[in-house]
Image (cartoon, rainbow, N blue to C red):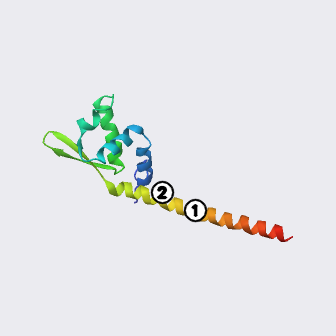
Amino acid sequence: MLRSMPNKKPLIEQTFAALADPTRRAVIRALSEGDATVSRLAAPFDMALPSFTQHLGVLEDAGLIVSRREGRSRVCSLNPSALRNAEEWMASQRRQWESRLDRLEAHIAKTRTEKSDD
């Protein structure tokens, strides 16, 4: 019998949902400069640590960051491949829309030419 994962969004949806929040985008920006401990990442934010770690959990669930234990600290790192997946999805959407707009532009030009010939 096949079982589906309850309420599990596709990874691309999780990625964009995670990036929709300004706190999580700030964490991604901070990690783009290098690995950081949870306490260092949390320092600029005016929120309780449990609330902040929920943000980290969303980023981890989406595959955007990974964390590991180093002694008594938890260190987070960026997962660039997850960001590349989002970038590739956006690029494919852009190519699709550019192609559609090119066809529309050609159709309009053809229609104008036909009207001027009448």
Closest to the observer, 57 or 64: 64
Question: Which picture quadrant has residue 88?
Answer: bottom left
Mark 1 nearby-residue class (10 Å; few <14, some 14–19, many ≥20): few
**Element under label 2?**
helix
Kind of residue indicated by mark 2: Met
Residue at x 53%, y 59% (from the top left corner): 94
Residue denoted by label 2:
90
Q: Name which residue lies at 74% across and 69% down.
A: 110
Q: Secondary structure at mark 1?
A: helix
Position of 87 relative to 99 (above/below): above
Q: Residue 11: x percent and y percent?
A: 40, 53
Q: In the displayed image of the protein, which residue is found farthest to the right?
A: 118
Q: Is residue 107 visible?
A: yes
Rendered view: 103 above or below 76: below
Q: Amino acid at mark 1?
A: Glu
The residue wearing badge 1 is: 98
As measured in the structure, the alpha-carbon distance from the residue carrying label 2 to the one carrying label 1 is 12 Å
Please say whether residue 8 is visible from this viewpoint: no
Q: Position of residue 99 (x, y in %)?
A: 59, 65
Q: Residue at x 42, y 55 (%)?
A: 86
Query: Which percent across, then down, holds residue 89?
Result: 46, 59
Q: Nearer the viewer, residue 108 or 59?
A: 108
Q: Quadrant of the N terminus?
A: bottom left
Q: Residue, x 37% and y 49% (percent of image)?
A: 62
